[in-house]
Amino acid sequence: MERRVKIVAGPITAEAVLYGTPTAEAIWKALPIEGRANRWGDEIYFSTPLDMPLEPDAREVVELGELGFWPPGKAFCIFFGPTPVSRGDEVRAASPVNVFGKVQGDPKVFKGVKDGEKVRVEEV
């Protein structure tokens, strides 16, 4: 069964598909999740109540539009372009993240989200 979520961040709404990972399962069970957007280059992240370990396949370089969970900050991350630590056009997290899903459609719509705006993730 494909699990889909709706992400509402400030004026932006997008859908994402969750992968079959332990982190995706924990996110799914915790829905709805809300927080306040923090911008870091072309990444939005916000703290969650989840406490997940780093998965064996965690990575720093992610694909455009992927969703990650950053264990040190218990943060849900949306990657939609380069960050301050990216090299060239790559999309790079501050440190390894558990990649657990991907935005459907153009993830660059999240460029319209400002620091402090409300973010809500819910079941579709």
Image: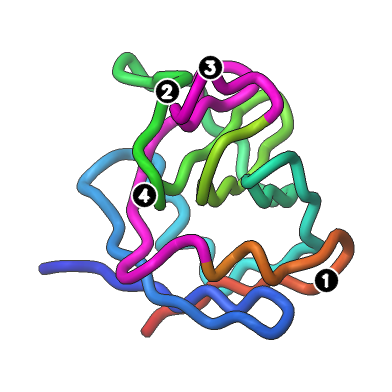
Name the quarter where the C terminus is drawn: bottom left
Magenta segment? 84-108
Left or right: residue 81 versus residue 105 is: right
Q: Earlier in the sequence, mark 3 or mark 4?
A: 4
The amino acid type, in three-letter code, at marker 3 is Arg
Q: Are marks 4 and 1 in contact (CB under 8 Å)?
A: no
Q: Which residue is mark 2?
A: 61
| Disc 4 from disc 1: Cα separation | 24 Å
At numbered mark 2, what does the secondary structure look like: helix, strand or loop? Answer: strand
What mark, if any, has residue 117 been given in the picture? 1
| Disc 2 from disc 3: Cα separation | 10 Å
Is residue 19 placed above or below 114 in the rendered structure?
above
Q: Earlier in the sequence, mark 1 or mark 2?
A: 2
Q: Which residue is mark 3?
A: 87
At numbered mark 1, what does the secondary structure look like: helix, strand or loop? Answer: loop
Q: Residue at the location (30% across, 72% down)?
A: 4
Q: Earlier in the sequence, mark 3 or mark 1?
A: 3
At numbered mark 4, what does the secondary structure look like: helix, strand or loop? Answer: helix
| Disc 4 from disc 2: Cα separation | 18 Å
Is residue 13 placed above or below 77 in the rendered structure?
below
Q: Are marks 2 and 3 in contact (CB under 8 Å)?
A: no
At numbered mark 3, what does the secondary structure look like: helix, strand or loop? Answer: loop
